[in-house]
Amino acid sequence: MRIAKLALSAATLGIAVLMLLPLLVFLLDSARNPELLRYEFKESEDPPRLTLLITYGGRVFLSDFNIRIIMSDGSSINTAIPRLEGGSSHAIDLPLSAEQSISPVEIKVSFKIASLYPLEVDVVERR
Amino acid sequence: MSAGKALRAIEVFLSGLAKGLVLMLVYVIAIPWLLSYISTGLLRAGQPALPTLNIWYYIALLVLFVSLETTATINKRNVYGLLATALSRLIGLSFVIYALNGGVIQGSMEMGNALVLIKLDIKPLLLLLIAYTFASIVLSSVDMSYEEY
């Protein structure tokens, strides 16, 4: 029975370390690099579109990456990236209708750190 | 009371006190505070959203842990001991779940003229803790039934 208890404790410790590692690495990367996950908008007039450039400089992969951009007129655009590897960049073209204002006021980003820990970031621009 | 019995009583109490203090340290202080401080601190999202409990709640929790662990040590070979062990672990687990807001750590910060709200879900770690707590209770009951034979 002592062996079973020891095995359970060792297995739990091992699994806990394996599960904690991606979270800790992501949080440490985030502390070291304030621009770990950077986004940048580029506007084009003809045809009206918004290009979103996402750059991720971390070491842990991010999955189920969803972005929701809320414009100043209340309309919104949704887009997704299945997997974002460390050190990669993604450019996403977001077509806009002619009447849509091209000034984003709120950006909601949600993803999972190493497919385990859901993280939601909501950036609200203040005027 | 003979000297031997008195020594045994002191030994049981000290054992309960030590186990109670360890449980208090692990469940009430280490796990919730560390996870919350690490997450919100490193994400630079303000102060961790831990419950601000009155000092008497912490003292009450400590007394509860010590009492249950002392009961568990005295009744090592019967069902009361198992119940006391299970209860102390479940109280600890409940506190962790309550302190960590059900596994969701939230924070906010100002960045230039933007307000950034962050919500981190650490439920996978809580599920691991729940699984471990239940497995240790089951192992304690199996251990006790082995000792009965």
Image: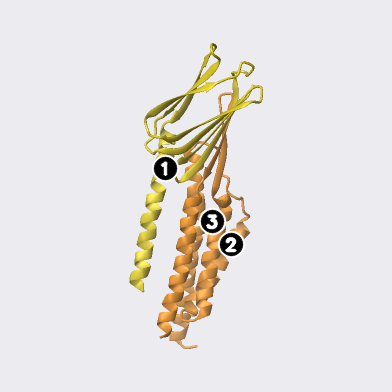
> What amino acid type is highlighted by mark number 1?
Ala
Colour orange, chain: B
For marks 3 and 1, give the CA distance. 23 Å
Foreground pick, A69 / B88: A69
- Residue beneath disc 1: A114
Disc 3 residue type?
A: Val
Residue placed under numbered mark 3 in the picture: B96
- Residue type at mark 2: give it: Ile
Q: Chain of mark 1?
A: A
Q: Looking at the image, which residue sits at the far right?
A: A73
What's the chain of the residue with tag 3?
A: B
Picture quarter with the C terminus of chain A: top right
Place residue A37 in its image quadrant: top left
Q: Residue at x 58, y 62 (%)?
A: B59
Where residue A6 sits: x, y (%)? 35, 66
Same chain, labels 1 and 2: no
Residue B59: mark: 2
Q: Position of residue B131 (x, y in %)?
A: 47, 61
Q: Residue B41: x and y, percent?
A: 49, 40
Q: Could you say whether the residue bearing mark 3 is in a helix, strand or loop?
A: helix
Q: Which chain is yellow?
A: A
